[in-house]
Amino acid sequence: MRVKLQLVICHDDGQEETVTDVIALNKNNQRIEHLGLSLAESQQLLGTLQHHILQQQVNTFLDTHATCPDCATPRKLKAHGSRSFRTLFGTFTFQSPRREHCDCKPHKTASFRPLSALLTEPVAPELLYMESKWSSLVSYGLSLDALKDFLPVDLSLDVKTVRYDTLKVAKRLEAELGEKQASCIEGEPSDWELLPPPEGSFKVGIDGGYVRNWMDKKHKFEVIVGKSIRRFEKSEAENKTPSLKRFGFVQTLDTKSKRCLYEVLRSQDFQMNQPITFLSDGNDSLRQLQLEMSPKATHILDWFHFSMKLTV
């Protein structure tokens, strides 16, 4: 059996244009492993389809900037160029011409590259998301292996690139947290009484540990990790899904650790009249992290550090 897939692009004016064949497959049907698409076939399909769709989108965008929007005069071509773009389904290179501005209006520059307004970043947001998501769960190397196993990403993608992209995303999220604050309790008791009745219960477990510095084996740094769980009683569990969030940071490097924990709780619809239980040991840094987080907080300690000081 021969399977041929074609891409048909429908323009806004209703005209249909059939682009070249996307993929042609010869499929057998005698064994179970012949059924459906294989992983290699699906990666080839995604990569080819991504290339055709992106190329058509880029061409359409460049065509709209080929003439002046004010006087409809064609813009002169000043120079040729190219621009690469990394996506979940491969890295692609597009023509990026430089055009001259029309003289009908004054401009700050004499020429510009239209594609720079579209490709504001060299990496697609979805690829950054997947790199950061996997890197938050496993090592950079395993993250890269997972991406290459299931997605037709560029073969030149390496561990350094994944680490750099993850760090860039982390810095952007850190900047969006807002200002550092000693107390996260918002409003007054009179304001909390006006809030809707809280739904579910929160439990937050926090612990810390020491990790050896990879570059300097004689030194180590403290890592704090935790888990926030929101559960519902049986009477209110209908149509409500429990929420579980994990968080972690380096105690000596992160300057907004309390704000980070507060934003995790807010993402689970935490409110000031909500009962919440914090579970931790008696470490001072952990205690300071959870204080002034909620007026309805209950703190439970396992007394590990206190007992250690007494017994050692």
Image (tube, rainbow, N blue to C red):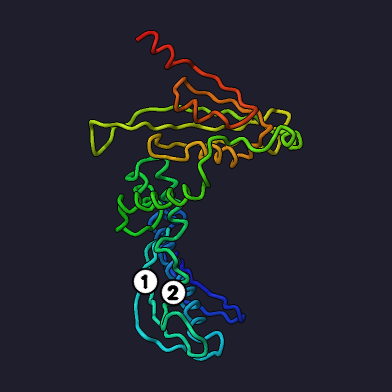
Residue 291 appears at what percent x and percent y?
Answer: 55, 28
Against 83, residue 146 (above or below) is: above
State the residue position of label 1. 83
Mark linked to residue 257: none
Q: Quadrant of the N terminus?
A: bottom left
Going by the numbered disc 1, the residue's amino acid type is Arg
Residue 264 appears at what percent x and percent y?
Answer: 55, 39
Residue at (53, 35) in percent of width and height: 182
Whether residue 149 is visible = yes
Residue at (43, 32) in percent of width and height: 224
State the residue position of label 2. 115
Check disc 2 and report its element: helix, strand or loop.
helix
> Residue at the right extreme?
194
Q: CA distance from mark 2 to mark 1?
A: 8 Å
Against 299, residue 128 (above or below) is: below
Residue 179 appears at what percent x and percent y?
Answer: 52, 45
Residue at (37, 8) in percent of width and height: 311
In this rendering, would 250 be left or right of 244? left
Going by the numbered disc 2, the residue's amino acid type is Leu
Q: Are marks 2 and 1 in contact (CB under 8 Å)?
A: yes
Question: 97 and 192: which one is in front?
Answer: 192
Which quarter of the figure has residue 94? bottom left
Which quarter of the figure has residue 255? top left
Disc with the residue nearer the chain's start (2 vs 1): 1
Q: Residues within 10 Å of mark 1 (few under 14, many from 20)?
A: some
Residue at (42, 79) in percent of width and height: 112
Give the total of numbered labels: 2
